[in-house]
Image (tube, rainbow, N blue to C red):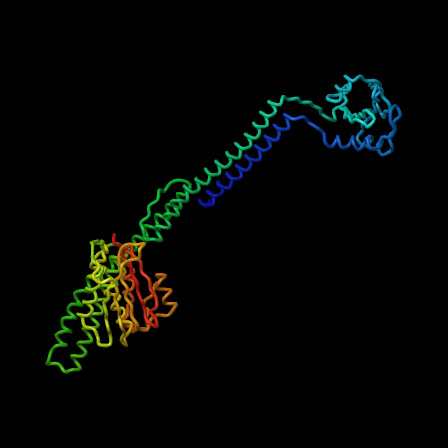
Amino acid sequence: MNPVRRFFRRYVFSTVGLLALLLFTNIAVLVVLLGISEVKGPSDRFQIVDFCAHLQGGGSSWQADPEAIGMLKEERAWAMVLSPAGQVAWEYQMPAELPRAYSSGDIAQFSRWYLEDWPVTVWALDDGSLAVVGRPKGSMAKYYVSLGRDYYDFLTTLACGIFYINVLLVVVLFIHSARRVEKAMGPILNAIRSLADGKPVRLQEDGELAEINTSLNRAAAYITRKDNTRAEWIRGISHDIRTPLSVILGYASELEESGELPPWAREQAGAIRRQSEKLTSLVADLNLTTRLEYALRPIDRKKLDGVELARQAVSEVLNDGLADCYTLTFMEAHPGRHLPVAGDPALLDRMLSNLLRNCIRHNPGGCRITVTVAPAPATAAGCLFIIADDGCGVSPAQLQTLNRGGPLASTQPADPAGEHGLGLRIVRQIVQAHRGRLSFSNTSPHGLTVTIWIGEK
């Protein structure tokens, strides 16, 4: 049988057992209460009242109408009416062995118990006479219980206490059963959550759900082995491709600068050099994103100045040469104010550089780029980096995808041959590694604004 089905079947059976225990306890309490109380026959009382309504007369002259006689015949019962003096004033099918006169003591005795083994029911009539209906011997059980008030209150309190203790017992047992389910399923749910987050998982392969734990351990081992294989393959490719790329770049640069070649040949060599540089950048990005994804690169946290960090990234882009169609401006929300952040200087510089080059890459017609450094909101310490451009912007669907963190190779139409989509992925990984926040919004009237918060600790 499936272990999950077997486990939950046991849980269902235990729940049914708890309900049965509650029902049994309630029945037991009811029996106890009935046992300590006087047994009355409400149906019999109703019948004798109904019977007395069909008696006519008074004193020593009483008669019963045919309906009353029919009631007695249906119950195989006999009846008599005793006058206030104890004499039988009227009778029907009364056994011959019974006396026809009774003292007050006799009446008191058979009204509570039996009249010579005949179970009888008694009802007082309006003129002081007494109607007595007798049933066949052995057809009724009559008991009279008399209890002291203190003892009756004690029994009532005891019965209530037993009932509430029973309810409390059911609640405790139900909680215990629920804890068993939580204890068995909790590690499995946590393991599934860890697998979704890419964390290693190892469960104890015992207990009622040992087969599921074993399957999760095998799945975790397979995912880890698969990820390690991919990471090792990427590292190997990055290492193996570095040397051929260096040779290609070197020869392409020499050919591009050679005066012995015609212009068209030097132009082709320059194209080879530029494409080789893009390939080098692609390999570097692929290697970095793999190392960040699998935590292969330790984060070297240092106390940094957010203003100097952003200024250095802007300077690097300007020093690499910026076309005249682009304008890059650096701004401080509070000039001269020190804005401390904690992070890896190389990774944070790469984050800002990727965002700046992303603005340039996706706006080939030119745009104005503004880098603003501002203090974090009052509820958080650290620094805000705001990179905004007035380029072509992104569509609402793309903006939603970016803020959701979904895979998006490019936020702008670009040359498929030159866009590999790792720039924003690396930015997001760096922000996550620093436990920061990243958000995207449209610039008015057009363009894209990227806001990054990096904490101080």
x and y, in percent, of residue 110 in the image: 76, 20
> In terms of depth relative to the viewer, which is nearer, 89 or 128?
128
x and y, in percent, of residue 335 in the image: 22, 63
- Answer yes or no: is residue 228 visible: no
- Answer yes or no: is residue 175 visible: yes
Please give left or right for residue 399 compared with residue 117 in the image: left
Tell me which residue sits at (69%, 22%) in the image.
Answer: 144
Is 454 placed above or below 322 here? above
x and y, in percent, of residue 427 in the image: 27, 62
Is 295 placed above or below 360 here? above
Please give left or right for residue 136 compared with residue 430 in the image: right
Is 117 placed above or below 392 here? above
Report the residue that reaches farthest toward the right.
61
Is 383 placed above or below 119 here? below
> In terms of depth relative to the viewer, which is nearer, 408 or 41?
41
> In terms of depth relative to the viewer, which is nearer, 42 or 248?
42
Tell me which residue sits at (30%, 73%) in the image.
Answer: 391
Q: Classify residue 263 by image quadrant.
A: bottom left
Tell me which residue sits at (11%, 78%) in the image.
Answer: 258
x and y, in percent, of residue 310 in the image: 22, 63
Q: Classify residue 85 by image quadrant.
A: top right
Q: Count the labels in the image.
A: 0
Please give left or right for residue 114 compared with residue 339 in the image: right
